[in-house]
Structures are given as C-alpha cells and as structure tokens.
Amino acid sequence: MKRLISLTISLLILAVIYWEIDFAGLVQVFQNCDRLWIVMSLGMVVPLVAITSWRLKQRSHPYRQLSISNACRQLKQRSHFHLLQRQYPGG
C-alpha cells in the first residue's frame, strides 16, 4: 500500500512536470540548434558519466560490489541531491 501511494505521487508529479513542457517550442529549439555542437556535447558527457561511474564502482566496498548501472544511478541521485542542496541551502 505504501509503495502504491509513493508510485501515485511520483506519477502525479511527473504529469505536472510534463504538462508544463512546451513540446512545440522544444522541437523548434532542437531543429534550430547546431547538430555538430549537440553531438560533441553528448560525446563528452556520456564518457564522463561512464568513467565516473566506473571509478565509483572501483571505490566501492569489496564485500558490496556495485554494478556499472547501479553506480550510474547513484551518481545521478547524488548530482540531483547536490543541485537541490545548492538551490535550497539550509533545508
């Protein structure tokens, strides 16, 4: 029951977020962007996340080995947490 309530709240939050997105404007932005710069930026971000996840996996406790996907997930959660910490200092 607790998990169902959590899932419902999460889906409601996602629905509100996606309701606010201007998809036509988003498509227009991607149509007008420089494709070379998009490819170059993604070409730098993806290896950076992969290397950082691998490093986190290597530093994990030997009795509790992380998979690369779990390390990636933890890295994403930590970056979101730090973003919120900077956005709302002190609580």
Image (spheres, helix red, strand yellow):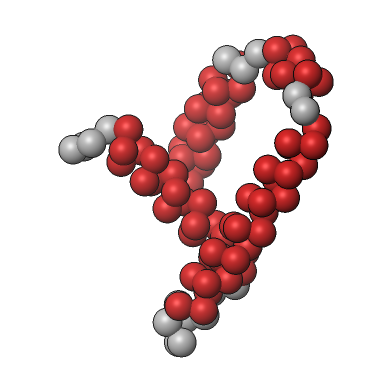
For residue 22, side relative to residue 5 (left or right) = right
Q: Position of residue 70 (x, y in %)?
A: 56, 64
Give the camera-side residue of 89 and 69: 89
Q: Quadrant of residue 80?
A: top left
Q: Quadrant of residue 90?
A: top left
| Residue at image coords 49%, 70% | 56
| The furthest residue to the bottom | 62
Give the camera-side residue of 88 and 4: 88
Q: Position of residue 41 (x, y in %)?
A: 68, 43
| The furthest residue to the left | 90
| Residue 70 in sight in this render | no
For residue 75, side relative to residue 86 (left or right) = right
For residue 49, side relative to residue 40 (left or right) = left
Can you say which quadrant of the picture contains the C terminus?
A: top left
| Residue at image coords 72%, 19% | 29
| Residue at image coords 52%, 39% | 7
| Residue at image coords 66%, 13% | 22
Task: Report the number of discs.
Answer: 0
